[in-house]
Image: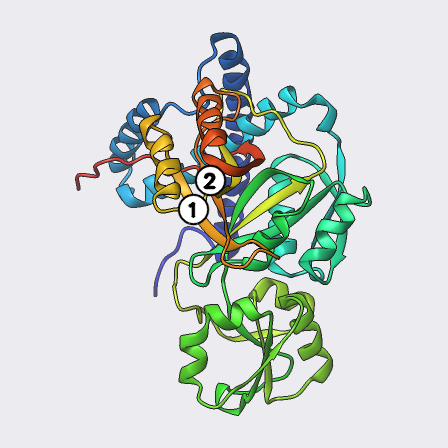
Amino acid sequence: MTDTRYSLDDIRKNVSRIDNALLELLAERRTLSLEVAKSKISTAKPVRDQTREQELLLKLIETGKQHQLDPQYVTQIFHTIIEDSVLFQQAYLQKLANPDSANPSARVAFLGSKGSYSHLASRNYFSRKQTDLVEISCSTFRDIFNIVETGNADYGVLPIENTSSGSINEVYDLLQHTSLSIVGEITQPIEHCLLTAVETSIEKIDTLYSHPQPHQQCSEYLHSMGNIKQEYCSSTADAMEQVAALKQPNVAAIGNASSGELYGLTAIQSNIANQQENFTRFIVVARKAVDVTSLIPAKTTLIMSTAQKAGSLVECLLVLRNLNINMSKLESRPVIGNPWEEMFYVDVEVNLKSATMQQALEELTRLTRFIKVLGCYPSENVAPTDVDIIE
């Protein structure tokens, strides 16, 4: 007979006690990270110090080994903690730089109903800003632009590119003519599942509902299912609503498992995207541009039209290279109404207010037929600090 010191209930109570203690310590650490941000204002030091982060991680890995904790495990946990600390400090510094926009609540327009990926991105983005949301569901991207432009919403959240299906062309085309500014970004993991309203099997599914983007992002899996009818909806949330209403064993929706639970759906197959690392980058637009403090990493997005002659685009890109400005995105789209003319969208990793970016704009203005800054905003992509893990 096995002798145990603790009952299962006792063990679970101890686990809960430790979990609560961890949460208290994480909250205390967050408070200290805010004090770090305040100190960096007076010293004008940037939020990120990757040399310091690397030293910290190496010490934590060594300490973890003394407690029989795997280095990969320790690194993964503290990458998440460091990311939260950086974003928390950035949000605080941005509130100081933009006191007029530091409202406790905001009206936010997004594509689809509750549970859509745009809805999840909206909640994740504004939770970092500690802002309460008045959520406004829209059925099209154009509706999002219109409702923000007319002042009926403070912000719009729009998908701009996906790691699997590429750029969202309709959003790029709408950006050509809007008066709105890009004021933020967030990268949202996209976890596609097959969701059904009744108990069934994959073999019985002959019709799939979703937004066109998930159909494209899961094309390889859908091909493996054979002759499947693909029904296009205005959003993944709309697809889940329809499948929930149909309650048939032969229909399924493509969407997020947690979102599916809102509609009473169950995931019968997970990880169906072409790429397992599937992410969508969303932009946040508003009527008023924001100032980005020099203490945090920034991106600037601009559009330009070059002369219709050989080498015109290359000349523009050489301006960025010569000024050591990193370009993270280059996208071309046809100019509506002007056949064979292209508009180029460029993301660069530099603050609009910097002397370097101002010089670049001056030179690009001379080289282009049209140029417009769509926005400068904090970069939300906190790349993990690399450390050499020696087992």
Please say if 347 is above or below 355.
below
**Kind of residue indicated by mark 2:** Asp
Residue 22 appears anywhere in the view = no
Circles 1, 2 touching at the beta carbon (< 8 Å):
yes
State the residue at coordinates (59%, 54%).
173
Going by the picture, which residue comes out furthest to the left?
390
Q: Quadrant of the N terminus?
A: bottom left
**Kind of residue indicated by mark 1:** Leu
* Label 2: which secondary element: strand
Label ID, residue 330: 1
Residue 113, percent across and down? Answer: 72, 62
Instruction: Tell me which numbered mark, 1 or 2, is placed earlier along the sequence.
Output: 1
Residue 308, percent across and down? Answer: 44, 47
Q: Dot 1, how many residues are within 10 Å of its Cα: few (below 14), some (14-19), or many (20+)?
A: some
Going by the picture, which residue comes out furthest to the front?
309
By what rule are the colours in the image chosen?
Answer: rainbow
Residue 168, percent across and down? Answer: 54, 58
Residue 117 appears anywhere in the view = yes
Q: Which residue is mark 2?
A: 347
